[in-house]
Amino acid sequence: MAAITHLFVYPFLFSLFRTSITQDTITPTQSIRDGATLVSAGGSFQLGFFSPGNSKSRYVGIWYTISSEIIVWVANRDAPLNDHSGVLKVTDDGLLVLLNSTNGTVWSSNTSKTAENSVAQLLDTGNLVVKDGNVDEPEKFMWQSFDYPCDTLLAEMKLGWNLVTGLEWYLSSWKSTDDPSQGAFSLRIDLRGYPQFVAMEGSKIKARGGSWNGLSFTGHGVRPTPVFGYEFVLNEKEVYYEFKLRNTSVFSRYVLNPSGVGQRFGWMDRTQSWELFSTFPADRCENYGLCGAYATCNINNSSICACLEGFLPKSPNHWGSVDWSDGCVRRTPLECNDGDGFMKRTGLKLPDTSSSWYDKSMTLQQCERMCLNNCSCTAYASLDVRGGGSGCLLWFGSLIDIRELGEAGQDLYIRMATTELDHLEKKRHSSKKKRVAIIVGLALSVVGMTIVALVSYIWKKNVINQGTKERSSRKDYDNEGGKEDMELPIFDLAAIANATDNFSNNNKLGEGGFGPVYKGTLPEGRDIAVKRLSKNSGQGLNEFKNEVIIIAKLQHRNLVKLLGCCIQENENMLIYEYMPNKSLDSFIFDQANRKLLDWHKRINIIRGVAKGLLYLHEDSRLRIIHRDLKASNILLDSNMNPKISDFGLAKSFGGDQVDSKTNRIIGTYGYMSPEYAVHGQYSIKSDVFSFGVLVLEIVSGKKNRGFCHPDHHLNLLGHAWRLWIEERPMELIDELAGDLFTLSNVLRHIHVGLLCVQQKPTDRPNMSSVVQMLSSESLLPKPRQPGFFTDSFEADPSSVKHTTCSANKFTISLLEAR
C-alpha cells in the first residue's frame, strides 16, 4: 500500500502567501483569515485554511508543521467554503465560528458553558481548545477539537464514550483524498457486552480488534514500548482507549484512510518522512466473521478456516468451496444439567464480546462455576491477563470471529458436553500411542492381523445386532407419511387412554389449533400432558410430523420436553412433561392471577423465554424459527419457570438459509411480524418481533390485539410507543405487579421490547443481543417506530366491538425498590 504521504496533497497557489500568527491563541478581538495560520507554542502544529487534493473548496484544519500535507483535524469537513473569504473567530460567549464573505456562519462549535474571558488556543498536542482565561485543566475546557476527531487519532486523544454525556469519540474516514467529509468507514469502541475495538463500514462490523485484556486488544497487538504507552479506561463515567508518547519529541499518528484501512505512522527525522508501522486489518483473517461461528482462522494454513475440536461444518458443501461463513455446529449437543465441561484452547484472539458479560473482581474458578450454572453460557476467559489473570468474561450464544495467534493470544474455555470431552480425550490419547501401535503392528504382523480380523468380526456382529434391535423397537412411521427417524419412545394407545381416564373432560386442560390437551398420570405416578390431534383440526398430520421431528432433537431448560408420541388406530398424539401452572396467558391476562406474578417472576419469565429462543436460533443443531410465539404457548412449571411449547408451525433452516417465504401464512395476529403477515417472509427476526410483543404484554398485563384506550385507537404496541416518545413509559407498567422493583430495570425491559418490534427486521436485534441487553447495563440504541402499531391490519372488522376503556391511573412515586 502506498505511503500515507501521497494521500493528502494540497495545490496551494504560489502567488498566495501564508502568514503565521506568532502566538498560539486568539481572543474575541482577533481572527484568522484565509492565508494566515495559528501556531502551537512548541511549534508542532499549525491551524489555518487549506484545499485538499484537487479540490478548490476551502476548509479550516490542523496539520503538522514539519509535514503540512498531513491534515489531522478538519473543522468544517461537511460544510466547505467556496472561496478564500473565510474568517475563523471566537465569540465572547466562547463559541468558535467560521464566517463566509457575507458574515454567515458556515460552521461553529457548541458549548453549554459561558465564559467571561473567551480564549481559543492551539495546544502542542494538536488539540484546539476554547477556555475561560488561563484555565489549563482539560475537564474545564469549554470545547476541544479532541472531542470531535476526524480521521486521525493523536496522542492523548480518546477513542470511546463519555457515559455521562453520551458523547462518542470515534474516527471516521474521509470520503476521498479530495473530500474530507465523513466517509463510509469508522473506528469505534463497541459498548455491547464487554467493550471492544471495531472497524465499521456503515453500520456493519468490517474488522474487530477485540476486547482489552489488560495489556492490549486481544486481536490487535498494541503493546507498550519505549516510545508508546497505552491506556484503556472502563468505569461508570467513561470507556475509552488512548495512546501516549513517552518521548514528546516523537511524532506518531493513527489514521483511517478513505479505503477503510487503519494505519499507524511515525515521523523519521533521518529521512524526513513518515514510516508505516502497522495496518489494520492486516490480512484476510481480520475480516469479521470470515470463518463463521465456532471456527478459527489461521493465515498460515492452506485452508485458513477450521472448526474447533468437537465441531463440524454447518454447510459441508459450502465449506469445501472455501465459503466458511456458515461456520460450524456442535457434534454433540450440550446437556446443561451437570453434563457439561470445558475445553481449553490457548493462543486465541477472543471471540466477539457483543453478547458477553463481565465482572472485574471474580476469580477464574468462580467464572467457571458461573458459566457452568447458566445453560446459555458457551465460554469463559480471564478478563485481565496480567499477574496470572483476574476477572471473569462470559460468552452467551455463538462464538464468532476467533483467530489463532500463538503466544500473542489468550486462553479460552469453551463449553462442551462431557461425552464429547471424553471422546476428544480418548482421541488425543490414541494419537499419542499411534506411532507405538504402528511399530508393534509391524513387529507382530501375524498377531496384529489376527486381532484386526477378530475386532472387525465383533464390530460387524454388534452393528447387525444393534440394527436388529432398533428396527424391532421403532414403529414404522412411513405409513403415516413421515420418513424421518423420530428417536422418541412410542406410547401404547391403551396406556394413554388409561392415564387420561379415557380422555375424560375432567382431565381436559384446554384446546388449541392442534386439538385438545389432556392431563394424564402414568402407572408409575408421573404426570403427563397429552396433545391429541383432532380430526377437525386446522393443523393436520404435517404439523404433527413437524413437531415430532423438530422438538425431538431439542433439549433446553426453557423448552417443553417431549416425552414421546402415540401413532395407533388413526390416533396421533404427542406426550409432554406436565406443566402444573398451565400457560402464561392464564396468568398475565387474568385480573386475579396477575397479582401472583410479581416483577421478579415476570422478569424471570422474559429472560427464560429469551434464552429458549436464543437456543432455537443459534445453539440447536439447526436454526429453528418458532413462528407462533405467544403467551398461550409459554408454559409454566411448578416454580413459574417458562418453557416454550407448540412447535407445529416451526421451521428448521439449514446453515445456508437465513430467511424464507411462504404463501401459507399461519400463526396468530397480534404477534405476527409485518413482513410475515403481509409478504409471507419469515426469519429469526420474525420470532424477535413476537418476543417483543410478549415482553410488552408481560410488563403491562394487557393484550396487544384488542387493547383499547380512551385517548386513542392504537394497539398495545402503539400505546407503548406513544408513551415512550412522550417520555412517559412508566405508565405502561402493570399496577397489579406490586411496587417492589427497580424502575430502571423495568424500563430497560420496555426499551428492549420496543427494539424487538421495530418495523424493519434489520433494525431488530438478534436474540443473543437481546439476552445480553436484558442482563447488563450497557447503553441501548434508540428504538424506531414499531410495526403494526394500530389494529387496522390485524383486526377482523366483524369482530370489532365498541367498548368503553378505563384509563390506567397507576402512578410511580418511588423510583427504586423499597
Image: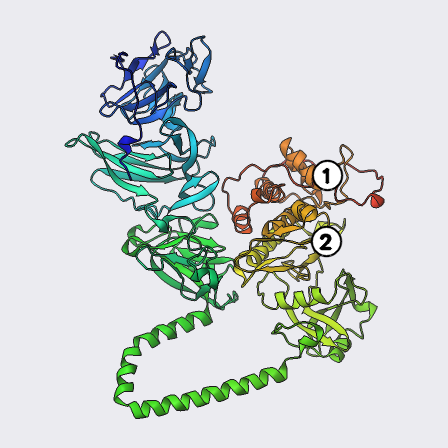
Query: Where is 546 relative to 122, above or below?
Result: below
Instruction: Say which quadrant the C terminus sits in.
Output: top right
Q: Name the secondary structure under disc 2.
A: helix
> Which residue position is annotated with label 2?
585
Task: Give the x, y percent position of residue 614.
Answer: 56, 55
Judged left or right of residue 148, residue 707 is: right
The residue positioned 81% from the left and 75% from the top of the image is 502
Near mark 1 (Cα within 10 A), the count class, few <14, some 14-19 or many ≥20, is many
Residue 31 appears anywhere in the view: yes
Q: Which is more N-terminal, label 2 or label 1?
A: 2
In percent of width and height, residue 778 lies at 49, 42
Which of 773 and 598 lies nearest the eye of the viewer?
A: 773
Left-right relation of 218 to 420: left
The residue mark sitting in front, 1 or 2, is: 1
Residue 790 is marked as 1
Residue sitting nearer the eye, 106 or 519: 106
- The vertical placement of 807 against 650, above or below, is above
Residue 123, by quadrant, is top left
Amino acid at dot 2: Asp
Q: Residue furthest left?
A: 270
Q: Nearer the viewer, residue 323 or 777?
A: 323
Helix, strand or loop under label 1:
loop
Which quadrant of the figure has residue 573?
Answer: bottom right
Q: Is residue 238 visible?
A: no
Where residue 418 appears, x then y in whole percent?
45, 70
Q: Amino acid at mark 1?
A: Thr
Q: Picture coordinates of residue 57 (x, y %)?
A: 39, 19
Taking the spot 30% from the left edge, 36% from the top edge, the residue there is 243
CA separation, marks 1 and 2? 22 Å
Contact? badges 1 and 2 (CB < 8 Å): no
